Structure formats: structure tokens, C-alpha cells
């Protein structure tokens, strides 16, 4: 049991390394395959032995080999986070390779969207739109039921379009980008319509808690925009594992 889990963690580190590239390049519309990895400071190509997840960062002392410019700590952080998120999925899910693959793909998409929303407040279409299609197609193989996935995509898009419309009507300004709409459609496609409400509730809860915390700590003014997509990503990850249990518990209260 432990060896497969360690392999999944190592696999997550490698995928995380690739997701770093996606987070840095996709919002600008750059290719994720060429050119190869380069130092952001001196453009020096990074060779394969300096591009090993986490370990390279440690043995290079967090600096570029060519120019000694510091490498962001976020690179190894994204790698370790992806490794841990993969590990938790493998540990919690029933031992079904197809189901695990489905969940790991969803996790990887959420990591990229979290990163791009956090960095530049963008949720690229090249992730969300194929994500909607992938969620619906994969539902045929591993669930939720294809109808639930299709309704999930519609419910996810519909509920945020409604919120967006109501906000605009009440305040006269756009409070939410269409990226959030497409992202919740993708989440609904992967998790099914029953989880759309759970994800929205968890994301709002996390956003409110962190927003209030930052305001109290005087780290932001009330006008600062919080990256809602990042909270949607966190909520969707939690719901992908425990959403059904949460929903059953909630419904049992009535
Ligand atoms: Zn450099």
C-alpha cells in the first residue's frame, strides 16, 4: 500500500512541475511545450538535471545555475502541493485506476486554475472549455451519470450567470468574470449537478473567512477583489472527495 502511494506522490511532483509551466504560460496564450524551460531572469535554458521536481530547487539553493537569480519558492510549493493532493485522492478513493485517473485529471485542472487566478486573476478558456467536455465524456466511464454531468455543467454556468446578471442589475458594474461561469460549469460536469450547490457554499464560506481575516489583519481594503476561482478550486477539490458525505449529512438535518 505504501509503495503505490509513494509512486502517486512522485507522479504528482512531476505533474506539478508541468502545471507550473501551464500556470506561467497559459494566461498569456504561450505554448506549453516550446521553448523548453528557461530561467525567467537570464533566459538560460534549464537542463533536465536542473529540472527535477523539488530536488533541483534544493541542490541549486533556490537559485539559477547560470545567473544566480533566486527561483520563486512557489515552484517547489506547487510541486509538493500537487503531490499531496494526488496522494490524498489515492488514499481516500476506492482502489479503481479509472476512477483515480479521473480524479487526478480534475485535480490537475483545479491546480492550474487556482494558480492562474491567484497570479493574474484569469481562468483560461484553454483549461475550462476542454475541461467541461472532458468532465461530460469521462462521466460515461466513471460517473457521475452522464445526465448528472450534463445538468451539472448547465447548473454551474446557469447559477453564476444569474448571480452575475443580478449583481450587474443591482450595482451597474460587472462583479464577476465569465471565467468563473465556465469554471463552475467544468466543476459541475466533473462532479454532477448535486455538487454545484456544495461547491458554491464551500467557496463562499472560504472566501468570506479569508476576506474577513485579511480585512481584520488590515491586509486589504474592502474593495480588494478576492480571486473567487481560487476558492472554487479549493471547494471543488474538497467536494470531489467528501461532497456526497457533506450533502447526505446536510440533508439528514431535515
Ligand atoms: Zn538565470
Image (cartoon, helix red, strand yellow):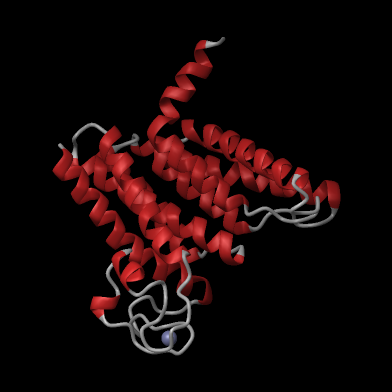
Residue 28 in the image: state x and y as whole percent: 52, 76
The C terminus is located in which quarter?
A: top right
Q: In which of the image's four quarters is ligand 1 placed?
A: bottom left
Horizontal arrangement in the rendering, residue 220 relative to residue 136 (left or right): right
The percent position of residue 46, horizontal first and vertical second, equals 32, 82
Question: In the displayed structure, would residue 80 be above or below residue 216?
Answer: below
Q: Residue at x 54, y 40 (%)?
A: 155
Question: Does residue 78 lie above or below 190 as drawn?
Answer: below
Above or below — where is 74 with respect to 1? below
Point out the image quarter for the N terminus.
top left
Residue drawn at 16 percent across, 44 percent down: 4
> Residue at the location (61% across, 63% down)?
121
Q: Is residue 137 visible?
A: no
Looking at the rendered structure, the number of numbered marks drawn on it comes to 0
Q: Position of residue 176 (x, y in %)?
A: 69, 54
- Of residues 137 and 206, which is closer to you in this image? 206
Camera-side residue: 155 or 230? Answer: 230
Q: Residue 151 location in percent, x, y?
A: 47, 38
In this view of the protein, can residue 39 be seen by the observer?
yes
Q: Is residue 215 left or right of residue 108?
A: right
Which residue shows up at 64% across the image and 43% down it? 207
Q: Quadrant of residue 120?
A: bottom right
Amino acid at each position: 500500500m505504501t509503495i503505490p502511494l509513494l509512486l502517486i506522490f512522485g507522479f504528482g511532483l512531476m505533474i506539478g512541475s508541468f502545471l507550473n509551466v501551464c500556470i506561467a504560460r497559459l494566461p498569456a496564450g504561450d505554448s506549453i511545450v516550446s521553448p523548453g524551460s528557461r530561467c525567467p531572469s537570464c533566459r538560460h535554458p534549464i537542463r533536465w538535471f536542473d529540472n527535477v521536481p523539488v530536488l533541483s530547487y534544493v541542490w541549486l539553493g533556490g537559485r539559477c545555475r547560470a545567473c544566480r537569480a533566486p527561483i520563486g519558492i512557489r515552484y517547489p510549493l506547487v510541486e509538493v502541493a500537487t503531490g499531496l493532493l494526488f496522494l490524498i485522492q489515492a488514499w481516500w478513493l476506492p482502489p479503481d485506476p479509472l476512477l483515480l485517473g479521473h480524479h487526478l485529471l480534475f485535480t490537475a485542472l483545479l491546480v492550474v486554475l487556482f494558480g492562474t487566478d491567484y497570479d493574474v486573476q484569469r481562468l483560461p478558456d484553454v483549461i475550462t472549455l476542454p475541461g467541461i467536455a472532458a468532465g461530460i465524456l469521462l462521466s460515461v466511464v466513471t460517473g457521475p451519470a452522464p445526465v448528472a454531468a450534463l445538468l451539472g455543467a448547465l447548473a454551474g454556468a446557469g447559477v453564476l450567470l444569474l448571480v452575475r446578471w443580478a449583481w450587474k442589475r443591482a450595482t451597474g458594474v460587472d462583479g464577476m468574470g465569465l471565467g468563473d461561469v465556465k469554471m463552475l460549469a467544468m466543476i459541475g460536469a466533473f462532479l454532477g449537478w448535486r455538487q454545484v450547490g456544495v461547491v458554491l457554499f464551500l467557496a463562499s464560506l472560504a472566501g468570506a473567512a479569508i476576506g474577513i481575516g485579511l480585512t481584520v489583519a488590515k491586509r486589504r481594503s474592502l474593495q480588494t477583489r478576492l480571486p473567487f476561482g481560487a476558492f472554487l478550486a479549493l471547494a471543488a477539490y474538497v467536494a470531489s472527495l467528501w461532497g456526497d458525505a457533506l450533502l447526505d449529512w446536510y440533508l439528514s438535518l431535515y
